[in-house]
Image: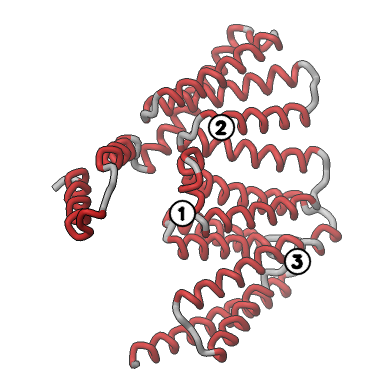
Amino acid sequence: MDKLAHKKVLLDTIRLSEGATFECNEEAILEEYTQKVENTSSVAIKVLSVFGGLFASLFFIGFLAITGLYNSEIGLLIFGASFIIAATAINKAVSKLIIDTISFSMYAIGFILLAFGLYGMDLGYNFIVVLFIIIAFSALYVTQNYMFSFISILIISGGFLALIVLNDVYTVVHLYIAMCTLLLTYVFLNEAKIIVSSKKLSKLYNPLKTALIFSLLFGFITLGETILTTESVQMLWLSSVAIIAIILYLISIIIKINEIAEAKTKIIIYILSALILSSTLFLPAISGTLLIILLSVLVNYKTGLAIGIIAFIYFTIQYYYDLHFTLLIKSILLMSSGMVFILLYLFTSKQLNSNEKI
């Protein structure tokens, strides 16, 4: 039995069990499911289509360089704006994989040409970045295609990071990370509320949660690359405070889900968790990836879980080679964290075994 037929059988079963009081728009449900299946492709194909679009964009930009278009700022602006508008219009009108690839290529080409044109007019980096953020916001409002929305959200978050770096206000990165952390947590924990709030938000939900994960990771990378003074290193705890507080909140949710009522058990869990998180006070990237992993496990988001694990390994390796801390301090922190993890594992295993006996 194919999936569409299975959905019909499921609706018939619900209708029989609920009786005459059950009402639903079967045609609309099946049509929505059919469109979803048609517009869904494997991750590998989407990745290949994105890379194909990027390579096509680069070749086309090279062709434009041969034609001499880069000698005319006005020409670059006209072509760039035209490509962005055309890509948005095509993406809104048709939603197919091949069309997505074409529109994505046009979208990327448009931004690149627009950047060259604006730069040639000496309008300044800040103006260019702000304009790109506005264009990306506008594109999100017009169309909510997955890849298109994903790229637009990354342009917006990347734009804010670019403004921070361009204006040398690196302490604002802490605020950026805190805002991304809060927004990511809200989006993950309020899926149903967001989806039913409006049709546009329901279409934006999946690309939004994936893009927010990458936006947070880009914030950690920016933080690591821009910390050059001892004062900045000492302020790393500012980014960690919000992350640690949210992780402890998630732990309280997990405790409720597992129906742990004994006060002693709760206290031990919180103490062990606090000990682990305290070792990451000056390592916000580590606690941040732990947050991504916890959120992904909590809502069963496999893609986010994979990204979180890979990022956790990457930032752990990067931290070990960080020259801001001595090797002795790193070794002590890693050993203490490992010991607390082992204690937490032994404690949870003991609790599981005792519950199984009951």
> Of marks 2 and 3, which one's residue comes earlier in the chain?
2
> In front of the other: label 2 or label 3?
2
Task: Name the foreground residue: 88 vs 21.
Answer: 21
> In front of the other: label 3 or label 1?
1
Describe the element under mark 2 as helix, strand or loop: helix
Inspect the image, locate mark 1, and give the three-letter code of the amino acid beneath it. Answer: Ala
> Of marks 2 and 1, which one's residue comes earlier in the chain?
2
Describe the element under mark 3 as helix, strand or loop: loop
Q: CA distance from mark 2 to mark 3?
A: 45 Å
Local packing at callout 2 (Cα closer than 10 Å; few below 14, some 14-19, many 20+) is: few
Q: Horizontal and vertical percent for residue 110? A: 58, 21
Describe the element under mark 1 as helix, strand or loop: helix
Q: Using residue 310 as the reference point, say whether residue 316 is left or right of it.
A: right
Q: Horizontal and vertical percent for residue 68? A: 63, 7
Q: Horizontal and vertical percent for residue 196? A: 46, 48
Inspect the image, locate mark 2, and give the three-letter code of the amino acid beneath it. Answer: Tyr
Question: Quadrant location of the C terminus?
Answer: bottom left
Residue at 46% x, 27% y: name it: 53
Q: CA distance from mark 2 to mark 1?
A: 21 Å
Residue linked to disc 3: 325
Q: Using residue 262 as the reference point, say whether residue 96 is left or right of it.
A: left
Task: Name the foreground residue: 61 vs 105.
Answer: 105
Residue linked to disc 1: 192
Residue at 42% x, 23% y: name it: 93
Residue at 62% x, 51% y: name it: 216
> Of marks 3 and 1, which one's residue comes earlier in the chain?
1
Q: Relative to 293, is 81 above or below? A: above
Q: Horizontal and vertical percent for residue 130? A: 73, 31
Q: Quadrant of residue 16?
A: bottom left
Residue linked to disc 2: 141
Q: CA distance from mark 3 to mark 1?
A: 43 Å
Q: How many marks?
A: 3
